[in-house]
Amino acid sequence: MKTEGDGEFLEENPPFQNGVTPTDSDVSPIQYEEPVSTYFEEKVPIPEDDVTKMFSFRKLWAFTGPGFLMSIAYLDPGNIESDLQSGAKAGFKLLWVLLGATIIGCLLQRLAARLGVVTGMHLAEVCNKYYPTIPRIILWLMVELAIIGSDMQEVIGCAIAFNLLSVGRIPLWAGVLITIIDTFVFLFLDKYGLRKLEAFFGFLITVMGLSFGYEYVRVGPDQGEVLKGMFMPYCSGCGPVQLKQAVGIVGAVIMPHNIYLHSALVKSREINRANKKEVKEANKYFFIESSIALFVSFLINVFVVAVFAEAFYGKTNMQVSETCNKTGSPHTDLFPLNNETLEVDIYKGGIVLGCFFGPVALYIWAIGILAAGQSSTMTGTYSGQFVMEGFLNLRWSRFARVLLTRSIAILPTLLVAVFEDVQHLTGMNDFLNVLQSIQLPFALIPILTVTSMTSLMSDFANGLVWKIGGGLLILLVCAINMYFVVVYVTALNSTILYVLSAFLSIAYLCFVIYLLWHCLIALGVPRLNICGWSQQSPSILIEEQEESDT
């Protein structure tokens, strides 16, 4: 049995030994041997405050950092493009979808943070101990695909920003190459200390806030319409275009690799995981910090949606072309001379802002896009490092990891930038959004599975409300993203691609069903365990691995 005193929990018998499942009352927090991470070797100490205080700003400040790094994924160029397209196509009518997606994202990030705090392991490490070899490798490949897809969007964003800032003097292919160099430079900032690195990310978020905030003030959208669109879930007069855009918002906001990233970032704080009070306190402050960070990211996204909703909703290509002609813009050829509704992306978005509100608006927009792209490329590389270390037990150097991911992401992007125009480059974003939507179940299902295991999470395992609510949320998000994928594939109008998609879909669904089977067993449906599969906790698997090594 276990003894409890002054918040310390000792464990004599490991859980799930010999396949016997202990009851919740018999389980206490488990201490795990923490693997050494390539990044974040420094631990941020947590100040000692009066234990009778319900809340401490000093402690909140100590826990501040991981949530803001995580929130950068909500501000990457893919999200910014989704925002401006939402405003241009639906006005303010889809702001409530953005709000709902951000709230759902916050709840899912809570699960990721709790996993890292309670166990001292991030999601990739837990999956490595929990799933058999073949499913584990498939999971790793799927998450890597999501990271590479996100990486390509970020490279595209940076290249376009350099092109806009240089008034076209820096071609897109050169912007792609510059992104390689500056990523290497910025990734070594953590040599100066973890808190300085977190401060640098905070600076980039501030740059985005000021840039897009300037555009918001300059355009001056109707505040009443902004609030109405945010809190009234309706979309009068909307059709398939707006529906597809609403689905795209959810797909852009909730990104699979971000779940893996956040579960690793929270390990950077000094927490005594044998002390239940400290673990509970850490969970509380990390949730508050993540909520604040995502609120900031939500406001920045609202700035972008509102700017394009106020200024360009209902505008036609002809109207925009005429205005750009009057201002002497050299980019009038981007807008065909017809009365079709204006379609914009992050490149065209900067151009039309410059035509309607002056060159300052264009340059500030480009600065915001550059900050979004640069910050998200760095967090994407961190995600790749954690995923590779966790799934494969590899300890690659930072240089090798960045070189690999940059090469994979940049090669196809560079080819398009050299041989095609900006339209094809920005057009890749639709395909990349679909790619990441497909990968979403491979983060959401595992995080719900492992955080519902009492053997792993002890008293901090998901309760009944979180199991049901989390399962429904994940089902909803996955269904929305699958709809987005189906809409995209059906628009390809290619029989060969239809057949290929059908075969891939069968394999994809089989693996998703396999993950759901494991998830339902962890959620407490033992009837599904028809193979007599023993749910060993990762702590047992670690011990067995150590014994086999010796």
Image (cartoon, helix red, strand yellow):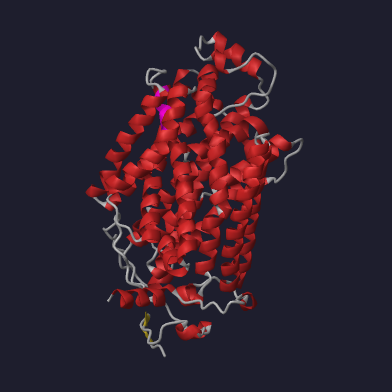
Q: Measured along the vertical axis of the image, is residue 26 above or below residue 408?
A: below
Q: Magenta part mainly helix, strand or loop?
A: helix
Q: Measured along the vertical axis of the image, is residue 236 above or below residue 88?
A: below
Q: Nearer the viewer, residue 185 or 371?
A: 185
Q: Measured along the vertical axis of the image, is residue 407 above or below residue 509?
A: above
Q: Nearer the viewer, residue 10 or 123?
A: 123
Q: Image point 45% across, 84% down: which residue?
A: 17
Residue 80 x %, y %:
52, 36
Q: Quadrant of the C terminus?
A: bottom left
Please give left or right for residue 162 compared with residue 239 in the image.
left
Q: Nearer the viewer, residue 112 or 176?
A: 176
Q: Quadrant of the N terminus?
A: bottom left
Q: Quadrant of residue 284?
A: bottom left
Q: Image point 49% across, 52% down: which residue?
A: 142
Q: Is residue 93 among what the camera can see?
A: no
Residue 383 x %, y %:
40, 51
Residue span colored magenta: 157-163
Q: Is residue 36 magenta?
A: no
Q: Nearer the viewer, residue 530 or 155?
A: 530
Residue 296 x %, y %:
48, 45
Q: Which residue is at the far right?
A: 237
Q: Measured along the vertical axis of the image, is residue 520 above or below residue 95?
A: below
Q: Is residue 285 among what the camera can see?
A: yes
Counting labels gives 0
Q: Which residue is at the far left?
A: 192
Residue 145 x %, y %:
47, 47
